[in-house]
Image (tube, helix red, strand yellow):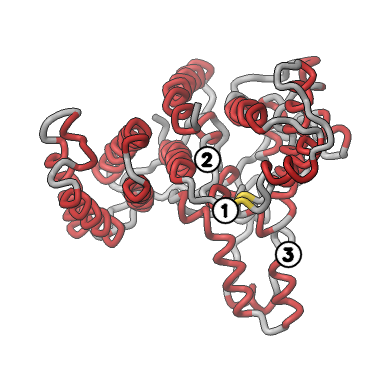
């Protein structure tokens, strides 16, 4: 099963669980979904991540196949339960260290910040996954122990997919302490602490399946009575656009590299730890940081009700386009896959920027031109959507034209609607 097929099958389950969590949160009267825009931004990040993964344009630093051919000493039977046990432990061990590295080094933090950028903690937050990490995959070398053992890549691919999807369930505040399981597996309570920016909790609980690695290497933290987790990042991103988040750290590093005068500091920028910046560069472009995690204003821009409603429509439309993209992907050429995927990313950037109350006129105009160009390429049948239902291509053209015109008319939305209101 390909990644695209697995997402196509898993997506309904993701949304079913989100719906159940929402209903349960209302029943328990817990403000888990206190910010509608945040939840949409989280799912939009998942749309962007799934799209870039399907594009297959990433660069792998060291391939597992190469390590297997070069370093394999043993050859484990793919039918042996021992092999599967070793793969589960090995991948989780590598996942722990890869996760910990992304929190330690600034360059790698870019590949993970989007996942922590939500100031809420719920199942949509689990879908906040990196685009930049898809483009540059640097942690393959952590699978070296498994390559030395000669574990076939096919087993790693299967376990890796399960390993990824497994991590979805514990992004919730509705499940409390699980007793003796807290000593073995990663639980919702533990992972909530990992997402917290409280001084007592920050940079703790890096485990993905098992919490044994955190206990072994001194990064485990249980919940402290009376200290409720506060979620987000200490340098808030202040945007709903996941694609913007996915490159903001690297852009900051590049800017610091140019602005700092010292050659030593320029070199240090490349290997800086998370949160470090040269003093002279930081003075030119200061970074907003949270000093008191218990008293700061969360990112909740207000937009007009009609603008926000339109953004919600665009969100569901883009989600539908993603599902259609996965459905059609095997019948598309390489160039067509890139064009369709790029169009979806443009849609995500447009409506998430509009959701901040910004006009996003250039993005919406670019989307309209891109759509018309692709419509001409497909001779009026945009990626074959008219074969599903007649006239959809024309309906989409009208919709994208109207949203662009609306952005010209409503340049500065009036702040009368708060996206912090509960659903």
Q: Which mark is residue 128?
A: 2
> In the figure, is residue 115 to the left or right of 100?
left
Give coordinates of residue 50: x percent, y percent: 46, 39
The alpha-carbon separation of the residues under discs 2 and 3 comes to 24 Å
- Label 1 neighbourhood size at 10 Å, few (<14), some (14-19), many (20+)? few
Pick whichever, 89 or 188, lies toward us.
89
**Cβ–Cβ below 8 Å for labels 1 and 2?**
no
Which quadrant of the view contains residue 271? bottom right
Q: Which residue is mark 3?
A: 272
Q: Which residue is mark 1?
A: 59
Give coordinates of residue 48: x percent, y percent: 44, 44
Residue shown at 46%/52% (left/top)? 243
- Label 2 neighbourhood size at 10 Å, few (<14), some (14-19), many (20+)? many
Secondary structure at badge 2 equals loop
Pick whichever, 365 or 370, lies toward us.
370
Against 142, residue 292 (above or below) is: below
Against 242, residue 369 (above or below) is: below
Label located before the other in sequence (1 or 2): 1
Label 1 or label 3, whichever lies nearer to me, is 1
**Whether residue 202 can be seen here:** no
Secondary structure at badge 1 equals strand
- Label 3 neighbourhood size at 10 Å, few (<14), some (14-19), many (20+)? some
Secondary structure at badge 3 equals loop
> In the figure, is residue 350 to the left or right of 253?
left
Label located before the other in sequence (2 or 3): 2
Residue shown at 54%/52% (left/top)? 135
């Amino acid at each position: 099963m390909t990644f695209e097929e697995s997402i196509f099958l898993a997506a309904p389950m993701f949304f079913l669980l989100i719906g159940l969590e929402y209903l349960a949160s209302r029943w328990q009267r817990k403000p888990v979904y206190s910010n509608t825009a945040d939840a949409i931004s989280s799912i939009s990040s998942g749309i962007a991540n799934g799209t870039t993964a399907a594009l297959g344009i990433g660069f792998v630093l060291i391939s597992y196949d190469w390590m297997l051919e070069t370093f394999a000493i043993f050859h484990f039977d793919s039918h042996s339960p021992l092999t599967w046990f070793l793969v589960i432990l090995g991948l989780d061990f590598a996942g722990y260290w890869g996760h910990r590295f992304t929190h330690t080094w600034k360059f790698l933090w870019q590949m993970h910040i989007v996942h922590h950028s939500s100031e809420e903690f719920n199942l949509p937050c689990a879908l906040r996954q990196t685009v930049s990490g898809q483009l540059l995959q640097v942690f393959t070398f952590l699978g070296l122990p498994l390559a030395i053992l000669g574990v076939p890549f096919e087993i790693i691919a299967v376990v890796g997919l399960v390993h990824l999807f497994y991590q979805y369930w514990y992004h919730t505040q509705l499940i409390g302490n699980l007793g003796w399981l807290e000593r073995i597996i990663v639980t919702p309570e533990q992972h909530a602490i990992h997402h917290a920016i409280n001084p007592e909790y920050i940079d703790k609980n890096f485990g993905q399946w098992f919490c044994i690695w955190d206990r072994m290497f001194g990064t485990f933290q249980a919940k402290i009575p009376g200290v409720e987790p506060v979620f987000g990042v200490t340098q808030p991103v202040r945007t709903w656009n996941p694609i913007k988040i996915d490159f903001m750290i690297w852009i900051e590093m590049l800017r610091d590299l140019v602005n700092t005068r010292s050659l030593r500091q320029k070199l240090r920028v490349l290997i800086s730890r998370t949160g470090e910046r040269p003093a002279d560069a930081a003075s030119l472009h200061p970074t907003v940081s949270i000093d008191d995690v218990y008293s700061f204003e969360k990112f909740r821009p207000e937009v007009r009700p009609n603008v926000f409603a339109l953004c919600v429509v665009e969100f569901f439309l883009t989600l539908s386009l993603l599902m259609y993209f996965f459905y059609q992907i095997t019948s598309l050429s390489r160039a067509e896959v890139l064009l369709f995927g790029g169009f979806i990313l443009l849609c995500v950037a447009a409506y998430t920027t509009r959701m901040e109350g910004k006009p996003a006129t250039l993005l919406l105009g670019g989307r309209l031109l891109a759509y018309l160009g692709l419509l001409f390429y497909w001779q009026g049948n945009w990626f074959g959507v008219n074969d599903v239902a007649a006239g959809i291509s024309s309906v989409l053209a009208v919709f994208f034209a109207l949203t662009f015109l609306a952005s010209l008319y409503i340049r500065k939305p009036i702040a009368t609607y708060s996206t912090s209101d509960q659903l």
